[in-house]
Image (spheres, rainbow, N blue to C red):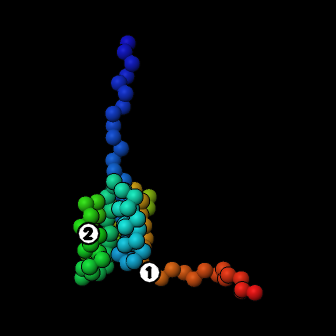
Amino acid sequence: MSAPAPSTSVSPAPRIVIAGAGPAAQALVRQLDGARFRGTVTILSNRDDAPAELLELAELPQVSVRFGQPASFIDAENRSVTTADGMELSYDELVIATGSAPAASPWRAPAAA
């Protein structure tokens, strides 16, 4: 009997869906691009217009920006997001980046003496 052939399956590229298209989402995409992320990134934007910052990101080969298609339902068990117009996207990682202002830290630096 011969030994089984080694597995040659290639794992699929990771899929990231970002719900939101503001500054936090844009910063994340820039970080992923700088880290040479080889998966796909889909940005779900509730905006119908196309600001220059998003158009710049949409030019990246691994990024798809869906203008006017905000996330309307998240199915965490099946790892999918449905947009307001009914498009369903599967993901490996979901980032909810719907705000642009960071929360204020309760920590304060000690006063200088």
What separation in Å lies between label 1 and label 2 (alpha carbons)?
19 Å
Identify the residue position indicated by label 1 in the image: 100
Q: Residue furthest top?
A: 1
Q: Where does the image place residue 36, in percent across and percent down from the top left?
A: 36, 56
What secondary structure is marked by label 1? loop
- Looking at the rendered structure, the number of numbered marks drawn on it comes to 2
Please say if the residues under marks 1 and 2 sit with CB atoms less than 8 Å apart. no
First-in-chain label (1 vs 2): 2
Question: Picture quarter containing residue 44?
Answer: bottom left
What secondary structure is marked by label 2? helix
In front of the other: 100 or 92: 100
In front of the other: 42 or 113: 113
Q: Where does the image place residue 86, in percent across and percent down from the top left?
A: 27, 69
Residue shown at 67% from the left, 82% from the top? 108
Q: Where does the image place residue 70, in percent across and percent down from the top left?
A: 32, 75
Locate residue 89 relative to residue 101 in the image: left or right.
Answer: left
Residue shown at 47% from the left, 82% from the top? 101
Instruction: Relative to 89, say whether 84 is above or below.
Output: below
Amino acid type, callout 1: Ser
In front of the other: 50 or 48: 50
Question: Picture quarter containing residue 99?
Answer: bottom left
Q: Is residue 86 visible?
A: no
Amino acid type, callout 2: Ala
Identify the residue position indicated by label 2 in the image: 58
Q: Quadrant of the N terminus?
A: top left
Locate residue 106 relative to residue 48 in the image: left or right.
Answer: right
Count residues near mark 1 (Cα–Cα under 10 Å), then give few for <14, some for 14-19, many for 20+.
Answer: few
Residue shown at 27% from the left, 81% from the top? 51
